[in-house]
Amino acid sequence: MASDMAAMSSPVRAAVAGALAGRACAGPGHRVFRRWLLILCALASTAAGPAAHAGEPAPVTLLYNAHVFTAEPDAPYAQAVAIQGQRILAVGALAAVERAAGPQARRVDLHGKFLMPGMIDAHAHPIWGGLTLVMPNFPDTNDAIPDLVAFVAGALDRKQGLLGDVLVVYGVDIGYWTQAAQIDAALSSGRFAQQAIVLFGSDGHTAWANRRARERAGITTAFLEALAPQERRYYGYDHAFVADGFLVDAGKTRIERSLPPYPAQTMLAAGRAAVHYFNGLGITAWLDAQAAGVVGGDLPLQAGDPGFLPVYRDLALRGELTAHVAAYPVIRPDSGISQLDEVQALQKQFAGITDLSIPGLKVFADGVVEFPSQTAALSRPYRNNGRLVAPLFQAAPFAALVTEADRRGLIVHIHAIGDEAVKESLDAFAAARQADPAGRLPHTLTHAQFVDPQDISRFAPLRVIAALQLLWAVADPSTNEVVKPYIDPGIYRTMYPARALLEAGTVIAGASDWPVSTADPFAAMYQAQVRDGPQGVLFADQRMPRLAMLYAYTRNAARVLDRADEIGSLAPGKRADLVLVDRDLLTVSTQEFKDAKVEWTMFGGRVVYGSGP
């Protein structure tokens, strides 16, 4: 069909373009016809390309002499791609693409490099990550308190990272939290005694606040004594209920609520930095896993507090949102069905913004497993304290909420770390599928750090996608020293069971959780293949095939965003989101794969990173 379109005369092209203009190309349409509509939209774009005059088709660019990975399972490899306007015109063998492109096409020799779809991150926190790029970010992982103190002192001297009169620092390695009392002794006395200081952990769930900042937030001995035991677990304190500054989930939320708001220009700079960072990694779409609401969902979502959504809107209005963003607000599930109304109110409030959508909602089933946080819901108690942590929702009401969300067309994206959290999340998805056996919404479970072997086989029949952060599948202190000694050995053995999920038919999508760790897809795909680290190999039987990871960061991740008919693979009619990589990712050695570099990134036919065609 692409060659048929290429053969049309200019008047016919213009007529079809006019007929397809407007909502026909952007709207959802009926799924049976949507793929054909997109192919015709490739033709429609010829009347509106930036280089075309009114009524004339945009020029065609032919990209050839490349190793092309299409991420289309029926035809995964090609020799050439032709693009026109914002869409792909043809993909396939060089001779066929040349015919579709026509004799006037501009030819670009890619010199044997690797051309692939724009990559997609199925779970990230880009605006928060952008803040780590424009605010002080402490990168050291040696857990040495003098280094941390020196960094804080330097930021204070330079007046960097001040929100009002509070000094805020991002990216602190969670290994520091085992020394919370020592940090408190250093940063709550001397020159810091009257200076409020808040440090945010690299995991996104933890923080630390000095005495001055705690006093402002009301985190006192009397406050801690008055809390129920299950609520105190979000705070670090000694036997006399004297806080040491450590905060996790609900405690982190409390300190965040005490901070002055970020200036609008800081938030815009953070958003802009995030977009540039992702584009530089070949990423042209992502799922923002906390676009509104709070980490942990310990406060109800309110449409009147839209979080980071205005940042995306402002970037879009400025023409700077060079990515497709699926934004997911975080709800508090135990607040009931009314939380879905808040999500839908946000959908209406931010409707019609180019490349921004709100397809559904995010839920936290639990927290994190690492010591000293230990808020992940495991099926057996933590070995150091005998505590059994339950999921953050009641099973029956949550199943009803997920079922209602599915009925309303809202995708549910669940954070689940512990094996018990995974099991009860799957139970909720099962209730939704039972209510609508034909339901096709791409509900997703992210992280899945520990999965009961009996639950491995449940993902595929329930059509639940696993969005995995396999950069974390590494044998080092993050998996051994702060996890292994504290949990049941049988649960530990199920850590990041990617290959088992794959072989059970689960759709696996690639995700980073940036800024918890780098968003570099090549680093994550490499680690998924090797699973090694300074302390050996983390379960070699769970190593992933390279091709599976390429699909994870393209076609499968597009399914998570519910946009696989437009992005995530190279096919006629789809968006011209392309990445050129400096080496053939399918044939280089594993070590060479790790060092792959993006030459240029194209979004909707326009180069947004590097020097492209």
Image: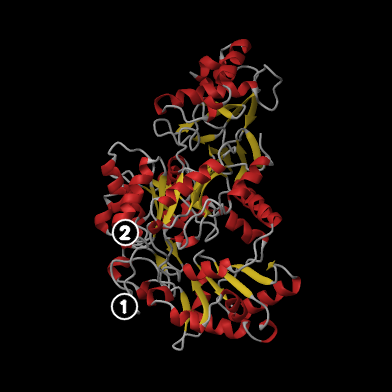
Q: Residue at image x 42%, y 30%?
A: 75
The mark found on residue 386 in the picture is 1
| Amino acid carrying mark 1 in the image | Gly
Marker disc for residue 482: none
Q: Identify residue for label 2.
A: 451
Circles 1 and 2: CB distance less than 8 Å?
no
Residue 277 shown left or right of residue 74 in the figure: right
| Distance CA(mark 1)–CA(mark 2) | 20 Å
Instruction: From the viewer's side, name the closer residue of 160 and 545.
Output: 160
Residue at position x 40%, y 40% in the image: 409
Give the x, y percent position of residue 243. 51, 82
Say which of 3 and 324 sits in front.
Answer: 324
In the image, residue 243 above or below residue 438: below
Q: In this rendering, does residue 280 appear at all?
A: no
**Residue 308 percent across, percent down from the top left:** 58, 52
Quarter of the image with the C terminus is top right
Callout 2: few (<14), some (14-19), or many (20+) C-alpha neighbours within 10 Å? many
Task: Report the front residue among 359 and 583.
Answer: 359
- Picture quadrant of residue 583: top right
Q: Please identify, in this view, whether the residue under mark 1 or under mark 2 is nearer the observer.
A: 1
Hey, which quadrant is residue 541 in on the image? bottom left
Residue 352 locus on image (x, y percent): 57, 36
Which secondary structure, mark 1?
Answer: loop
Residue at x-position 59% and y-position 86%: 185
Answer yes or no: is residue 76 visible: yes
The three-letter code of the residue at mark 2 reads Val
Tell which residue pokes out farthest to the bottom in this image.
240
Residue toward you, 499 or 36 = 36
Where disc 2 sits, the SS reads loop
Q: Residues within 10 Å of mark 1 (few under 14, many from 20)?
A: few
